């Protein structure tokens, strides 16, 4: 059985003012191409399919996009296994699961063989089996969503927590018990290989500059290294940096399918191709590359000399995601003109800030004196430029032109 492991799609996500839908859909389309090109039997997406920023209409369009790009793969008997991550909306995913089960109630009891040619979403711990399309054998899959109380503490009635730390400890314990407990489950087949799909932060992983929209205090670190060797392959999601764990090449984070923020600017993105035989893993997993959008910071401290250089240094920056930092000199530099030129150089800037070169540290007496000395016209211009930063270019230009005319009347 040929398995393609991916995770952390974050569909319909945003980075600052930039909608990432087109970037992420392009990656999904490349994954669909790999499914056909590599004769994949199972596509396993280890959590965080959607962005928590996605609106209902965007989610509907995303599912319609899946139908288009994976139609051929599914029609030829390919199967998509997915599970929920910490960024997936729990209520939406549970509703989707119920609707899918109502339309085709075929998942059945834990450990049952499920039909191929379908998409399955696991919103709670799920054990199932799939038949190999080529050899006729079977492979077990154990799918573990991100640890939340509704997914892992439902049997405890209505658990009470005296602190966030206690809640985290309970969830870690419940997750580890669920993971270890699969081997004692009556539905588990000791004569068949088993693949684990999980969305969790495992001990021994390298996080990178930061967790994606989470602090270390909010995350849960689980110990699972004692059971890794009992799985033919471990497909992990949650950590966006691709890597294998503890020197074991069959235990992997595939990483996200795109660079999601500045902390991932140096990551090389891809998906992992794996082959599972009757006795387990066949050969070494292979990483298939995914193109990724460039993300970087640009700092400008002397606009007159640096702007011409930037044009030569970044001639193909139309699709790059850029965080701009600008220092300008009032009375010499035209802030509006500089920002307009930067818009043309970096049309997909996702964040920007600027300061006047003589501005001192916040709260100092000198700064307050300087601010009081700023002209009325300069104060109005700076305010309008900042407030209109995210407005359409034509609308912004018309409003600034009108403001200049009014300022000129006041001066006259």
Image (spheres, rainbow, N blue to C red):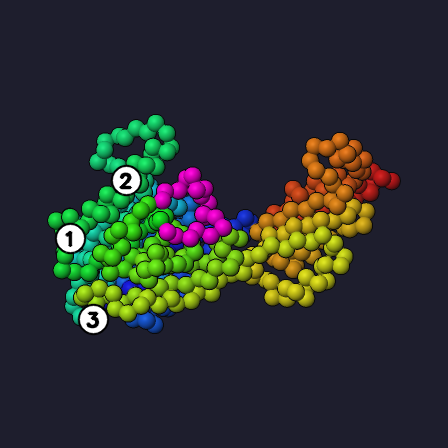
- Of residues 402 and 195, the one nearer the viewer is 195
**Rendered location of residue 114, percent (x, y):** 19, 57
Instruction: State the residue at coordinates (61%, 47%).
Output: 390
- Confirm or deny contact between disc 1 and disc 2 (CB under 8 A): no
Q: Is residue 234 magenta?
A: no
Instruction: State the residue at coordinates (29%, 49%).
Output: 224
Q: Secondary structure at mark 2?
A: helix
Label 2 crowd (10 A; few <14 / some 14-19 / many >=20)? some
Label 3 crowd (10 A; few <14 / some 14-19 / many >=20)? few
Q: Is residue 220 magenta?
A: yes
Label 1 crowd (10 A; few <14 / some 14-19 / many >=20)? many
Q: How many marks?
A: 3
Q: Is residue 153 above or below residue 62?
A: above
Residue under label 1, please give it.
188
Left or right of 48? Residue 230 is left
Task: Tell me the quadrant of the picture where the C terminus can be found.
Answer: top right
Left or right of 159? Residue 291 is right
The magenta stretch is 204-221
Quarter of the image for residue 146 reads: top left
Whole-number angstrom distance, CA of label 1 to CA of label 2:
21 Å
- Of residues 264 and 376, the one nearer the viewer is 264
**Rendered location of residue 355, percent (x, y):** 70, 44
Residue under label 2, please give it.
173
Q: Secondary structure at mark 3?
A: loop
Q: Is residue 373 above or below residue 107?
A: above
- Confirm or deny contact between disc 2 and disc 3 (CB under 8 A): no
Q: Secondary structure at mark 1?
A: loop
- Mark closer to the chain start, 1 or 2: 2
Residue under label 3, please give it.
134
């Amino acid at each position: 059985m040929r398995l393609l492991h991916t995770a952390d799609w974050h569909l319909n996500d945003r980075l600052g003012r930039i909608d990432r839908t087109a970037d992420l859909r392009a990656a999904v389309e490349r994954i669909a191409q790999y499914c056909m090109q590599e004769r994949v039997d199972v596509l396993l997406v280890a959590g965080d399919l959607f962005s928590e920023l996605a609106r209902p209409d965007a989610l509907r369009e995303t599912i319609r996009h899946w139908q288009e790009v994976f139609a051929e793969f599914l029609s030829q008997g390919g199967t998509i296994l997915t599970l929920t991550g910490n960024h997936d909306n729990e209520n939406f995913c549970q509703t989707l699961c119920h609707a899918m089960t109502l339309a085709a109630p075929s998942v059945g009891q834990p450990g049952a063989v499920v039909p191929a040619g379908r998409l399955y979403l696991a919103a709670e711990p799920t054990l199932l089996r799939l038949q190999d399309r080529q050899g006729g054998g079977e492979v077990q899959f154990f799918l573990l969503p991100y640890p939340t109380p509704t997914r892992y503490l439902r049997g405890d009635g209505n658990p009470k927590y005296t602190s966030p730390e206690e809640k985290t400890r309970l969830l870690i314990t419940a997750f580890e018990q669920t993971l270890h407990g699969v081997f004692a489950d009556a539905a588990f087949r000791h004569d068949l290989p088993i693949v684990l799909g999980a969305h969790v932060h495992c001990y021994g992983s390298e996080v990178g500059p930061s967790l994606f929209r989470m602090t270390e205090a909010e995350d849960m670190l689980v110990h699972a290294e004692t059971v890794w060797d009992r799985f033919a392959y471990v497909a992990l999601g949650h950590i966006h940096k691709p890597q294998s764990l503890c020197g074991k090449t069959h235990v992997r984070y595939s990483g996200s399918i795109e660079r999601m923020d500045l902390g991932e600017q140096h990551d090389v993105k891809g998906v992992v191709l794996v082959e599972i035989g009757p006795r387990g893993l066949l050969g070494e997993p292979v990483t298939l590359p995914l193109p990724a959008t460039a993300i970087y910071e640009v700092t400008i401290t002397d606009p007159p000399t640096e702007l011409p250089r930037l044009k030569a240094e970044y001639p193909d920056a139309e699709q790059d995601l850029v965080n701009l930092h600008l220092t300008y000199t009032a009375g010499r530099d035209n802030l509006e003109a500089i920002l307009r030129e930067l818009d043309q150089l970096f049309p997909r800037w996702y964040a920007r800030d600027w300061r006047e070169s003589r501005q001192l540290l916040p709260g100092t007496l000198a700064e307050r004196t300087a601010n009081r000395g700023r002209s009325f016209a300069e104060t109005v211009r700076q305010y309008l430029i900042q407030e209109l930063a995210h407005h359409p270019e034509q609308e912004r230009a018309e409003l600034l032109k009108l403001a200049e005319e009014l300022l000129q009347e006041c001066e006259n």
